[in-house]
Amino acid sequence: MALYWVFVLAVAVLLYVLLDGFDLGIGILFGPTRDESQRRAMLHAVSPIWDGNETWLVVVGVVLWGAFPIVYATLLSALYLPLLVMLAGLILRGVAFEFRYKTQRLRWIWDAGFAVGSLLAAFIQGMTVGALVQGLPIASGRYVGGEFGWFSPFAVLCGVGLCLGYALLGACWLVQKCEGDTRDLAYRLIPRLSVGLMIFLIAVLTYALYKDFPVMGRWLDRPWLFVFPAIGIVAAIALIASVRRRNDGTPFTMVVVIFAAAFGTLAISFWPYMIPFAITIDQAAATHSSLAFMFWGEGLFIFPLMLLYTVVNLRVFRGKITANSPDY
């Protein structure tokens, strides 16, 4: 039963990263964009689905709270401050999304709020991943790092990297959904963002090797883990080829594969730890009765229904938006 909930948690995290990732990425790209028609196209590209995408973050929180309460308590103890900032960013971008259509004179405030909120949320999520990779200060199952024990140069680097990754996801979504100037803008941005992401990956690997992070030893012990980076490299080559051919439907799929490969690399590198390298799955799992009780609600009905809803939502709103698409 614990393994089932690990599977649900992994799927929920990956879907959140992919689905809300391109939402946040479009918000990041929205900031430096000055053309109002392009900004409207960016919002039209995500307006039917953005709030449903964020629901997967709620699933992550619920599964941690119910199935792995020790992990939930430990992560919140360590990350109260950054998670509050992340939630503030998500709330700000949600409010700005609604309000920018209701005003003209103060629209610039809500445009800035949408961009800043997206950037904050993406940056904090990247910092959280970086803190977990580097390792949180935990002793006897308790977080002992104080208010800023999660903060480090590596965490900041990961925050910047995830912003680049989300922006790349967003640009590829715009290629798939938009036409005309907005699609051309996204095509111009994809190579630059790809280069930036590659520089980030090299910097992260170099830093991790220099600091001798425990996760690097696991790569040496499990050489088959390099299958995931190999998949990512093949997808990156296919991404470059699709951009050159202007094949609108391929870039987003290839970036999804790259993100999935990176997620698989981290997940297998951490196994069987929930918080590397301090709390294992067995140590973190709730009692069997609690896990079984959750299964009849969240596990058997809500989780499959959310998967179905996501598939139906993406299918209903598939295809490209047009210049005559109605406002949100």
Image (cartoon, rainbow, N blue to C red):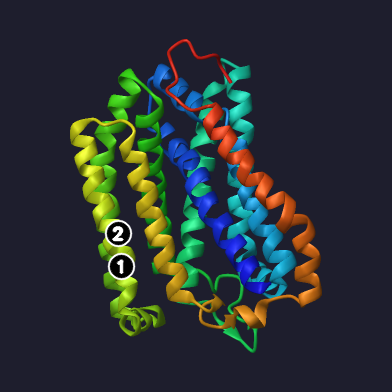
Using the image as rendered, state which of residue 57 and residue 230 is in the foreground: 230
| Vertical arrangement, residue 46 with respect to residue 102, above or below | below
Amino acid identity at mark 1:
Val
Q: At numbered mark 2, what does the secondary structure look like: helix, strand or loop?
A: helix
> Outermost residue toward the top?
324
| Horizontal relation, residue 218 to residue 108: left or right | left
| Corner quadrant of residue 31 | top left
Tell me the crowding category of disc 1: few under 14, some 14 to 19, or many 20 or more residues within 10 angstroms, Cα based: few
Question: Which mark, by number, is residue 231?
Answer: 2
Tell me the crowding category of disc 2: few under 14, some 14 to 19, or many 20 or more residues within 10 angstroms, Cα based: some
> Outermost residue toward the bottom?
140
| Horizontal relation, residue 215 to residue 101: left or right | left
| Vertical arrangement, residue 61 with respect to residue 222, above or below | above
| Vertical arrangement, residue 291 with respect to residue 320, above or below | below
Residue drawn at (61%, 76%) of the image: 146
Determine if residue 288 is in view.
Answer: yes
Q: Position of residue 234 (x, y in %)?
A: 24, 54
Q: Alpha carbon of mark 2 to alpha carbon of mark 1: how far?
A: 6 Å
| Vertical arrangement, residue 133 with respect to residue 238, above or below | below
Q: Position of residue 109 (x, y in %)?
A: 55, 28
Label 2 with label 1: CB-CB less than 8 Å: yes
Which quadrant would the C terminus be assigned to in this image?
Answer: top right
Q: Which residue is mark 1?
A: 227
Amino acid identity at mark 2:
Ile
Question: Which mark, by number, is residue 4?
Answer: none
Q: Position of residue 63 (x, y in %)?
A: 68, 62
Q: At numbered mark 1, what does the secondary structure look like: helix, strand or loop?
A: helix
